[in-house]
Amino acid sequence: MAVSVDDVFSQITARGLRVTRQRRAVVAAVADSSVCLSPLEVFEAARRDCPDLGLTTVYRTLELLGEIGALRRVHGADGCERLVPAGSTHGHAVVCDSCGRVTEFTECDMGDVVRAATRETGYRITGHFLQLSGLCVDCAAQGDGGARTPAARPDGRWNEKGSR
Ligand SMILES: [Zn+2]
Ligand SMILES: [Zn+2]
C-alpha cells in the first residue's frame, strides 16, 4: 500500500500550492511506509532529507495530505493517532498490534449496519469509519506473539494485498 508521489505532487499543484523542498521531504517520508507513523516519526524521517524542516510544517503538510486523500488516520495500538498512506478512496486499515504494520482492505459489508443505524437513529448515514486490529501474517507466524485479541486474528484474507 503506497501512494504515488507524482500524483500527490500534482494534487498539491492543483490546489495552487507549491511543491516546496519541505513538502517534498514529508511526502517522501510517508509515501512508502508500510507501518503507521506518528507525526513525530514523520518529522524525524523527513528531517534527514531536509534538516531545516519545522514541526509546524510537518503538521500542516500532513493535514494537506489528509485533505487530498493520500493519508489515512489510524489509531495505533497505544491509542495515539497515526498516519498511513491511503491506497484507495474507500479503504480500511488493519493494524498489527505487535509490529504496527498496516494493511488496507476495501471490502466491507456495512449494509446491515447502516440499515440498523438508520432505523435506530433516523439519520441519513453518509459514511463510515472502520478499523480492525490483529496480528499480521509475520507476527502470527512467530507463535503467540502476544495475541491478545484472538477474535480479531487475521484470517489471511485481509492481508492478501499487503506489500512491503
Ligand atoms: Zn506484525
Ligand atoms: Zn467501508
Image: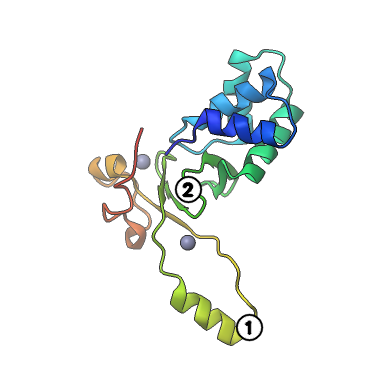
Amino acid type of disc 1?
A: Thr
* Residue ID at (68%, 24%): 19
The amino acid pointed to by label 2 is Ser
Residue identifier under label 2: 88
Q: Please report contact status of discs 2 and 1: CB closer than 8 Å, yes or no.
A: no
Q: Nearer the viewer, residue 24 or 73?
A: 24
Question: Quarter of the image holding residue 39?
Answer: top right
Pointer 1 residue: 121
Name the element at disc 2.
Answer: loop
Query: Are there few (<14), some (14-19), or many (20+) residues within 10 Å of tag 2?
Result: some
Whichever of labels 2 and 1 marks the residue nearer the N terminus, that label is 2
From the image, state whether disc 2 or disc 1 is nearer to you: 2
Say whether residue 151 is left or right of residue 92: left
Q: Is residue 143 left or right of residue 102?
A: left
| Residue 2 higher or lower than 113, as above or below | above
Give left or right: position of 8 versus 97.
Answer: right
Q: Distance between the residues labelled 2 and 1?
A: 29 Å
Image: 155 above or below 76: below
Residue 150 at x, y = what percent? Answer: 32, 59
Q: What element carries label 1?
A: helix
Query: In the image, is 113 to the left or to the right of 151?
Result: right
How was the colour assigned to the protein in this rendering? rainbow
Nearest the eye: 88 or 14: 14
**Residue found 49% across the figure and 32% down from its top:** 4
Position of residue 8 measured from the top left corner of the image (x, y, whole percent)? 58, 33
